[in-house]
């Protein structure tokens, strides 16, 4: 072989290697890309296959720290149930009995999560106290909730729920659907003892959370057999407007406006009732006719309270007006005025003013002024007494079941006019008079 032939062979081999090198590089790049795509898909497929089997589901559950499941069967990728589910960790204990979960994985293909069934007979949550002092209430800021997929909740039924043995509800049911920030609540039911709340309507989880909800509330009545309230809630979670209709124990209509996210909890409410009797023990003469009530203020600072009504006295209607500043601890600047019927020579008036507190024990500091008021007409089957009370003034102090009062009265009786001054001391069982002074035209007694 000559040198020329050898050189030709070397050039041919080098050209072959150069032509194969780019092809080999592209081949391995394609292999790596396919692996990057196929390996996650294979892992997801394997995970789905594992979750679709009872054995795989049980294995996955065993991997969760602190989780104990008894009597379970089914697949987490579809229908699954268990007699009990227990989880303990991070100072929290959660227990669920008779759990049933059923959802439709096929809905994911249409970008929707379908929870067909979620049941639990009993839920118990135990939280260890943090040891930190409770922070004062702050204004609540609403987040934007924009779901990337649609959600359809078919049948959620949860039994009794307790937190540290304190009952939150006896039963909770929910049917709803949502997409993006828009929610439609088909049915939401809450039960606790004799309290029942049912709601339906629309809600948007953006901005100030606009809403339009219809709510039915059933409460245990202090008297009678039922007390139901129908609420129409409109506006938003930040600026809530309500219209209410009450039937049963209280037949009334109400309108109001509030800001439940404000830490002060401001509220403006107006209520009207044609007739209201608070308790069966009260006589018919103390039934409120044409009752009006208005509240304006906040739970933090108190409510300016105004009320008016008529009492069906035995001698004609008695006009009642009430005003004061009411807080969670008591009422200040309270003024209760009664005006007798216009049928007599003069209507007569009675006024009770002062402050009342119920923060620790019930206390009251009151002033009484009565001018020819027919007080006896508010007591059933009582005729006008032979001694007419023309004027009565006094100061009354009440402290935890005991009271004392200083009274000054002017009366007219068969023997003529007389004035009376006395001090009263007593409790709910007995009363004693001291410093009694009676003055008449014929003399005085003291």
Image: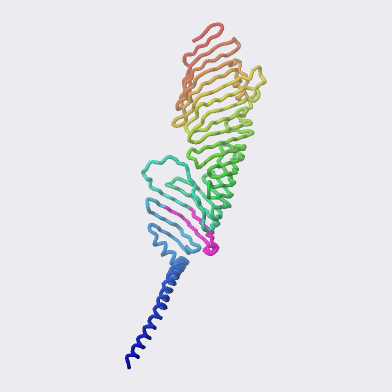
373 over 99 or under it: above or below: above
Magenta segment's dominant SS is strand
Range covered by the magenta-colored residues: 94-121
- Given residues 124 and 215, the one toward you in this image is 215
Q: Is residue 437 left or right of residue 242?
A: left
Residue at 45% of width from left, 32% of height from top? 359
Residue that lies at the very extreme toward the front in this rendered image? 4
Residue at 47% of width from left, 29% of height from top? 357
Residue that lies at the very extreme toward the right in this rendered image? 343
33 over 363 or under it: above or below: below
Residue that lies at the very extreme toward the bottom in this rendered image? 1
- Given residues 58 and 6, the one toward you in this image is 6
Q: Position of residue 302 (x, y in %)?
A: 50, 33
Task: Report the quarter where the N terminus lies.
Answer: bottom left
Q: How many marks?
A: 0
Q: Position of residue 410 (x, y in %)?
A: 56, 14
Q: How is the image coloured?
A: rainbow
Magenta stretch: residue 344 in it?
Answer: no
Magenta stretch: residue 102 in it?
Answer: yes
Q: Position of residue 239 (x, y in %)?
A: 55, 42
- Given residues 297 and 26, the one toward you in this image is 26
350 over 57 or under it: above or below: above
Q: Position of residue 397 (x, y in %)?
A: 47, 23
Residue at 60% of width from left, 43% of height from top? 230
């Amino acid at each position: 072989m000559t040198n020329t032939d050898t050189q030709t062979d070397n050039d041919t081999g080098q050209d072959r290697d150069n032509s194969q090198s780019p092809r080999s590089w592209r081949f391995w790049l394609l292999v790596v890309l396919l692996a990057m795509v196929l390996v996650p898909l294979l892992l997801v497929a394997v995970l789905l296959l594992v979750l679709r089997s009872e054995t795989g589901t049980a294995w996955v559950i065993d991997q969760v720290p602190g989780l104990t499941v008894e009597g379970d069967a089914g697949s987490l990728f579809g229908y699954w149930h268990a007699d009990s589910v227990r989880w303990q960790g991070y100072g929290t204990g959660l227990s669920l009995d008779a759990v049933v979960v059923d959802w439709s994985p096929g809905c994911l293909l249409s970008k929707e999560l379908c929870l067909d069934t979620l049941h639990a007979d009993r839920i118990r949550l135990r939280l260890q106290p943090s040891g930190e002092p409770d922070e004062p209430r702050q204004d609540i800021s609403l987040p934007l909730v924009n779901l990337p997929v649609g959600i359809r909740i078919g049948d959620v039924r949860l039994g009794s729920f307790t937190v540290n043995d304190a009952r939150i509800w006896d039963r909770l049911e929910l049917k709803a659907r949502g997409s993006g920030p828009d929610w439609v609540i088909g049915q939401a039911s809450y039960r606790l003892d004799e309290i029942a709340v049912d709601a339906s309507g629309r809600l948007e989880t953006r901005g100030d959370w606009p809403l339009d909800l219809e709510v039915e509330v059933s409460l245990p009545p202090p008297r009678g057999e039922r007390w139901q309230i129908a609420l129409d809630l409109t506006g938003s979670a930040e600026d809530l407007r309500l219209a209410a209709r009450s039937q049963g124990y209280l037949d009334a209509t109400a309108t109001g406006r509030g800001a439940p996210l404000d830490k002060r909890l401001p509220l403006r409410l107006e209520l009207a009732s044609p007739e209201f009797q608070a308790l069966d023990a009260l006589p018919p003469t103390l039934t409120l006719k044409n009752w009006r009530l208005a509240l304006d203020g906040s739970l933090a600072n108190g409510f300016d309270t105004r009320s008016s009504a008529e009492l069906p006295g035995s001698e004609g209607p008695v006009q009642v007006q009430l005003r004061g500043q009411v807080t969670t601890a008591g009422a200040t600047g309270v003024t209760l005025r009664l005006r007798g019927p216009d049928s007599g020579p003069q209507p007569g008036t009675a006024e009770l003013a002062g402050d009342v507190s119920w923060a620790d024990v019930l206390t009251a500091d009151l002033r009484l002024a009565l001018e020819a008021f027919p007080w006896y007409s508010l007591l059933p089957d009582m005729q006008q007494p032979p001694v007419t009370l023309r004027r009565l003034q006094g100061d009354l102090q009440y402290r935890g079941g005991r009271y004392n009062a200083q009274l000054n009265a002017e009366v007219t009786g068969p023997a003529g006019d007389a004035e009376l001054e006395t001090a009263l001391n007593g409790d709910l069982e007995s009363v004693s008079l001291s410093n009694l002074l009676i003055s008449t035209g014929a003399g005085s007694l003291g």
